[in-house]
Image: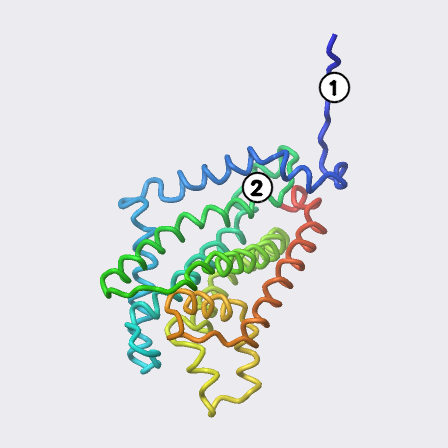
Amino acid sequence: MTKKHRIVLEAGTVDRHYWRDLWTYRGLFGFLAWRDILVRYKQTAIGIAWSAIRPLLTLAMMAFLGWLFESKVPGDVPRLLLVGAATLPWTFFSTAFSEASNSLIANSNLLTKVYFPRLIVPASTVIVCLVDFLISFIILVVLMLAYRFTPDVRLLLLPLFLLLALVTAMGSGLLVAALNVKYRDFRFLVPFIVQFGLYASPVAFTSADIFGNERIPQALKFIYALNPMVGVIDGFRWCILGGSSPLYLPAFLLSIGISLLLLVVGVRYFRSTERGFADVI
């Protein structure tokens, strides 16, 4: 006869198996991701078309601002491509960060009823944002074809910079998601952070406008380089536009360090507060 084993899962009693549980509950991860894809634009007039409209509006606005303030355009690169290469990672990061930050509150009913690694909830929202990234990438490809612009072999390194953007979004998203459970003020801060970050990142302009400007103090240049999206956006431009958009190595290495630090801090704080989510939420 086959022996039957009963497994009882209770929150707080399986910490030593937590990372193994992430794999055990991969089905839930897939379910949450698929559910978010289905309901994101449900009951909207134009549906999934919003995934294309949002990056297009951002692209148009940033291109206009860059032209208005006479931001430098390296080489013979069209301004739309320069801004499009930056809008691509920024749209992914801003959407993933916003969705992950509010994911625990949005799934509060699920958190109070059954045990599973809570890390799955914000992680699934970040992965879903890759769908929007793919749509934005197709828009950029169409623009490149329209301008007859052909990237070089550096385009093959683009997945590495996408991974860096994902790490940045995941780390900051986990940190703010955990804080948002206890301090609901963060739901008002997240839109402000995203809006401020858009203008503090090289989307409408380039890092050459900052690092090549002698009127900007070195201290402000260092603070600018602390923005982890600076390295991500510069990396995307470097891969897509080639040598026309140089990669500032010190700022890039600093961005990598900040991104990894955000991930470590985000995961550690999330894990340290995870047990109390059901009580507070």
Per the image, the residue denoted by label 2 is 108
Contact (Cβ within 8 Å) of mark 1 with mark 2: no
**View extreme (front): residue:** 153
In percent of the image, x 27 and y 46: which residue is there?
46
Q: Quadrant of the N terminus?
A: top right
Q: What amino acid is labelled 2 in the image?
A: Ser
Q: Quadrant of the C terminus?
A: top right
Considering only vertical position in the picture, is 104 above or below 86? above
**View extreme (top): residue:** 1
Considering only vertical position in the picture, is 212 above or below 100? below
**169 sits to left or right of 78:** right
Residue 56, image x, y percentages = 30, 60
Rendered image quadrant of residue 141: bottom left
Considering only vertical position in the picture, is 142 above or below 82? above
Q: Secondary structure at mark 2?
A: helix
Query: Please, which colouring scheme is shown?
Result: rainbow
Dot 1 or dot 2, earlier in sequence: 1
Q: Secondary structure at mark 1?
A: loop
In percent of the image, x 31 and y 64: which residue is there?
150
Per the image, the residue denoted by label 1 is 5
Label 1: how many Cα within 10 Å (few below 14, some 14–19, many 20+): few
Considering only vertical position in the picture, is 125 above or below 147? above
Residue 129, image x, y percentages = 45, 50
Q: What amino acid is labelled 1 in the image?
A: His
Determine the CA span between mark 1 and mark 2: 31 Å
**19 sits to left or right of 46:** right
